[in-house]
Image (cartoon, rainbow, N blue to C red):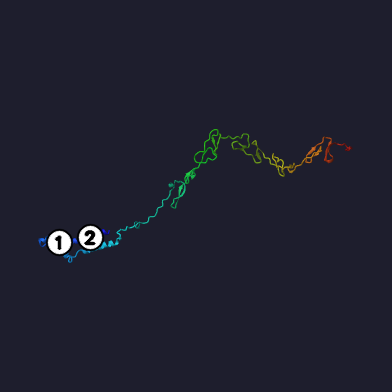
Amino acid sequence: MRFILLMVLTTLLLLSGCGETKVYPATTAGDAGDTSSASADAQADAAPDVPLDVPAASADTASADTALDASPEDGSVTDTPEDATTADVPEVCVPVTCELLGFNCGAIDDQCGNTISCGLCSPPNTCGAGGNPQVCGCSPDCENKTCGDDGCGGVCGTCEDPTPNCTDSGACEADPCEPDCDGKECGGDGCGGNCGFCYPGFICNEASQCEEQCLPACQGKDCGPDGCGGSCGDCKLAEGCSATGQCITECVPDCANKECGSDGCGGSCGSCPPGFNCEIWKFNQTMCMPELDDGQEEK
């Protein structure tokens, strides 16, 4: 840069000097041949008297010097930083979309501070049911089923003979059952239904007939029959049930050396034939003895 300025300054000075050069006429032929020399001498003699266009050159020189002084000493040119005139540009957030993630249900964070909905599922589909999160799907349900709808528009299987019919519970069965209630007042019809019900106070017996209900009579009883074919209870071991339905210690009948009379437990050791009476002898023995007529004495 310094070299270029010097070249410009030199060119201006040369142009300024050439414009002010004066040529003097020669007086003799010899002098005419030395015109260039005379012109040079005349220019030198006239230099003090004829002013040159020095101010213009001086102004140019001053400008050049000023430019040189303002330039860096090493001759390098300082560039203006680009960011000095460029305004700061804020970063733009690019939101994440449901389509980009492959979601079609539920809600997501778009990574820009917003929550967006990806949509809803239509029945029987539910969000994530197919195994993919936030994607509508359906999970077939064929547990304990051999046929029928799987809940997702498919089937769990088909039925074949001899059970060609699929029930609502997903089981294969034979042809539809025909109810049988002939001669029945109550009870099942053989197909899961009922042939009828009995009025209060009646029960349905094994023959599917309504009969009057028997009310067990066990009040005040510990054991024995209840009057309806059942029992009021059982006694412990070594206990017996009395006629009144009480559990008592079991009695052991004693009929040793006895032909008749009580056995000591409410029973009998035997009875005498007509004309004989049961007599008690020594040591609690009993015997059948003939009846005595009036006036006869026992021997």
Asked whether the residues under the numbered discs 2 and 1 touch, taking CB atoms below 8 Å apart as contact, a structural biologist would say no
The kind of residue on which mark 2 rests is Thr
Q: Which mark is residue 90?
A: none
Residue at the image point whose x is 24% and y is 62% from the top: 61
Q: Position of residue 287 (x, y in %)?
A: 83, 37
Q: Residue at x 15, y 61 (%)?
A: 37
112 vs 292: above or below: below
**Mark 2 lies on residue:** 10
Alpha-carbon span between mark 2 and mark 1: 24 Å
Q: Which secondary structure lies at badge 1?
A: helix
Which quadrant of the structure image shows residue 38? bottom left
Q: Which mark is residue 37?
A: 1
Name the image quarter holding the C terminus.
Answer: top right
Residue pushed farthest top?
A: 162
Residue 223 percent location from the top left of the image:
72, 42
- Amino acid type at image mark 1: Ser
Query: Could you say which quadrant of the image residue 34 lies in?
Result: bottom left
